[in-house]
Amino acid sequence: IGVENLQGSGLIAGETSRAYSEIFTLSFITGRSVGIGAYLNRLGQRTIQAVDGPMILTGYSALNKLLGRDVYNSQDQLGGAQVMVPNGVTHELVRSDQEGAQAIIDWLSYVPRDTWSLPPMIRSVDPPNRRIGFKPTREPYDPRDMLAGVQTPDGFTPGFFDVGSFKEYLSGWGRTVVVGRARLGGMAMGVIAVETRNVERRVPADPGNPESREIVEAQAGQVWFPDSAHKTAAAIRDFNRGENLPLMIFANWRGFSGGTRDMHGEVLKFGAQIVDALVDYKHPVFIYIPPFGELRGGSWVVIDPAINPSVMEMYADVESRGGILEPAGIVEVKFREHQRREMMHRLDEKLVVLGKELQGASASSRSVDEIKAEITAREAQLLPLYTQVACEFADLHDRTGRMKATGCIREGLEWASAREFFYWRVRCRVLEQQLMKEVMTADSTMAAADAKSMVARWLPRAGDREVVEFLERADTVQQKVRSVRQAAIRRQIADLQEELGEMVEKTPRKHWLPRLLRRTRTGSSAATPKTPKTPASIAGASPVPTVSPSAAYPGLLGSERAAAAGAKGSKQRE
């Protein structure tokens, strides 16, 4: 046992980190996971933990010896469920291996067969054109009822997604945000919603510090805190990498918490990570402001479609709001109290008369004070009314009609029929994007913007449903893709002929012929008729050369002496 073991652990850690960016990764901690084993679970990001499977860096006995007294009495105090669920390392907690195996199967049901395939789609018994039964209210409510439905004394009230398809993850961490996976008409999707109720965040006391105490922090609904902003960014990355899921964000945030404690807790950094995750997102993203929801200030900025316009679209319910500040806040900034009083004196007849009387009164007359008192009383009487009118005027700027008129949203929607609308819109965008990838694979020189423009010319100028029906006619679409591939091959051949002609003119045959033969043997990219459909070619990544671990790391898998001994043994056997 020596540093070569640590080197091996580093090699495994690096491979696991790279794997998360390239394929779907998932860890199930069914027993104690120590040291590099705990790190590997985190490097794979997605984690299912059994209640009796702690993740620790050092055992509690070693820590007690280091501290010189018995502080910890179990591994669960260090990395059990009560630690790993609230801090966001564990996505799902299970009670047994059988429950863990079922959790793995459930998660895999949302995952495509490979990293360049479409998300899985199953036949749904819940029709996509059904009306949404549960409707959000102005009062705080459980967002899970909006997503999955709720059982009431009058029966079951269905939500936005297919009945029984919503599965929440990371439920114990960043509780002002709800994330999970669900199905819409059988299509797998990533989901992010907002908790509208107030919640509590608990920070446990440290047994190693006698002065430590448990901290209980209140967190308001509709606000991003450091933990919930981090949770949002992490969920977006998980949906994007290896899962290829279209993403639905039910946006109902009033902003970020910017107090001293939260700024110290890096809310600014985690909010920026939301933008980073959306910039990197490769699949369709739909932002929808639900009924009576609002999207304000910085919370609008970090999910605005301008961040990644090629994949992001924003919609708003006709009863939703969006803007920098709430109407009352805007009024205090743009139409202050003294301005409202000036308007009263211009519009109110009684104040106009009193103002004229005040100007005509003598400075020494006792009536001046009386007139001023009447003016003050009249202003106090009118101020609430003028403030209400001002707030209503400010609210008009936050409504769906203005959002659409300014081009900030794509469409205003009715909540009851939003399920059917998004079913066809999501299918349309997913199929369009898949066709763009096929076109870019057929012609490897084509840019994404050119592929998008070409696909747009092919599609009928109709609704999403008609476009989906057109794209599902494989013969028509594939014929167009083949024509793109043939044109690319003809262009490559013409380029080769032109290059060959220049070589013949400039150099003798004995010089250009060997060069041409070498290019033919090595498989010049210009002479390659068809780009193979591989994960690397789809993602645009360059192939990674394979290097044996023993060659890259001489200390791994035996030393040079061991390798020499192995070679000597093989000679003896011969």
Image (tube, grey):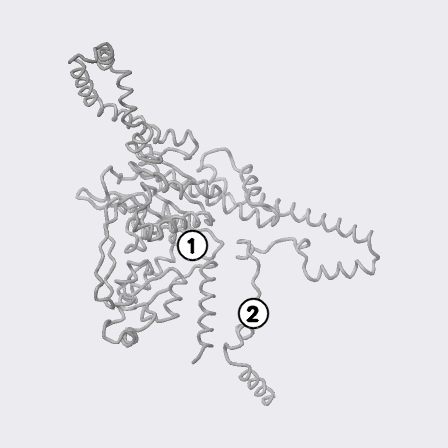
The outermost residue toward the top is: 360
Residue 360 on image: x %, y %: 23, 9
Q: Is residue 371 above or below residue 154?
A: above
- Specify few, some or many for label 2: CA neighbours under 10 Å numbering under 14, 14-19, or 20 or more: few
Residue 27 on image: x %, y %: 37, 64
Side (left or right) of 395 relative to 527 = left
User: What SS does tag 2 mark?
Assistant: loop
The outermost residue toward the front is: 364
Q: Residue 547, labelled with which disc?
A: 2
Residue 97 on image: x %, y %: 30, 67
Q: Is residue 403 above or below residue 310?
A: above
Side (left or right) of 421 relative to 562 = left
> Mark 1 or mark 2, which is nearer the start of the sequence?
1
Look at 37% across and 41% down and name the residue there: 298
Disc 2 from disc 1: Cα separation: 28 Å
| Residue corresponding to mark 1 | 243
Q: Is residue 445 above or below residue 331?
A: below
Report the amino acid beneath label 2. Val
Side (left or right) of 88 relative to 526 = left
Report the amino acid beneath label 1. Glu
Q: Which quarter of the figure is the N terminus placed in?
A: bottom left
User: What SS does tag 1 mark?
Assistant: loop
Look at 30% across and 55% down and name the residue there: 173
Viewer-proximal residue, 194 or 283?
A: 194
Q: Which quarter of the figure is the C terminus placed in?
A: bottom right
Viewer-proximal residue, 436 or 131?
A: 436
Which callout, 2 or 1, points to the residue nearer the camera? 2
Q: Is residue 321 above or below residue 505?
A: above
Viewer-proximal residue, 176 or 494?
A: 176
* Number of disc labels: 2
Look at 29% across and 43% down and name the residue there: 222
Residue 149 on image: x %, y %: 26, 45
